[in-house]
Image: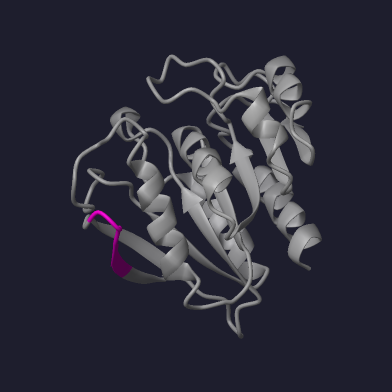
């Protein structure tokens, strides 16, 4: 694991960790963390599990902290300027592998990742874990159904069976507005996926494998 720094288009220096596979990278991936004002950072068990899973499958994986989080410069921007952070992370990780980039986000990070992907053709596919559909978290709204119908790249929507922010019924309704969305519900857990991290990461890894294998 290599600590790195990289800079956004608006000049914010971000900290991250790059994990490279043992051999040549077969693809690249970026991981986006949960809400910075609710304890979110790149250092959470579900994100570690996803990072390890993807690296073990041959991906160059960059996990980073959004602006204003831990050692990243700048200030929290309500989830709006954070799309610039995702774009910069994609720039950085693509130095290690050509082709489309797989982006995985959890909670707040899923919201930001989805909004960046709508505008960024470099994102080949998305894994959105616990995408908040009930907005107690003070984040930008989920893109409209009209916007989502235009997004034809593959999307995995994953949440825990008792996820209070991403309930199954609402998640499946959202998936129905997207041309290429799969839903996966992890039983016996909630938004935080405690003790189910490896299970969830395995689902994400298999999804990435199917797409880029």
Which quadrant of the rendered structure holds the C terminus?
Answer: bottom right
Residue at the bottom extreme, as displayed: 23
Indicate the position of residue 76 as horizontal and vertical percent values.
Answer: 25, 36
Residue 131 visible in rendering: yes
Q: Residue at x 66, y 26 (%)?
A: 146
Magenta span contains residue 6: yes
Q: Residue at x 56, y 16 (%)?
A: 164
Q: Residue at x 29, y 29 (%)?
A: 37
Q: Which residues fall within the magenta stretch?
A: 4-10
Q: Residue at x 44, y 66 (%)?
A: 91
Indicate the position of residue 109 as horizontal and vertical percent values.
Answer: 46, 39
**In the figure, 174 relative to 53: above or below?**
above
Pick whichever, 192 or 113, lies toward us: 113
**In the figure, 35 relative to 42: above or below?**
above
Magenta span contains residue 48: no
Q: Quadrant of residue 212?
A: bottom right
């Amino acid at each position: 694991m290599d600590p790195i720094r990289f800079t956004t288009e608006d000049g914010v220096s971000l900290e991250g960790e790059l994990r490279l596979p043992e051999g040549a990278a077969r693809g690249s991936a970026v991981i986006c963390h949960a809400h910075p004002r609710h304890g979110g950072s790149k250092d959470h068990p579900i994100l570690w599990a996803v990072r390890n899973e993807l690296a073990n499958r041959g991906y160059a994986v960059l996990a980073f902290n959004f602006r204003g989080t831990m050692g990243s410069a700048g200030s929290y921007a309500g989830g709006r300027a954070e799309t610039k952070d995702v774009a910069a992370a994609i720039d950085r990780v693509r130095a290690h592998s050509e082709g489309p980039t797989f982006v995985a986000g959890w909670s707040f990070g899923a919201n930001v990742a989805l909004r960046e992907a709508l505008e960024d053709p470099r994102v080949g596919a998305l894994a959105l874990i616990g995408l908040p559909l009930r907005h107690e978290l003070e984040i930008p709204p989920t893109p409209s159904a009209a916007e989502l119908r235009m997004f034809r790249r593959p999307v995995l929507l994953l949440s825990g069976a008792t996820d209070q922010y991403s309930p199954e019924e609402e998640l499946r309704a959202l998936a129905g507005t997207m041309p290429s969305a799969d839903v996966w519900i992890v039983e016996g857990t909630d938004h935080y996926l405690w003790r189910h991290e490896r299970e969830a990461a395995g689902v994400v890894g298999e999804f990435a494998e199917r797409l880029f294998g």
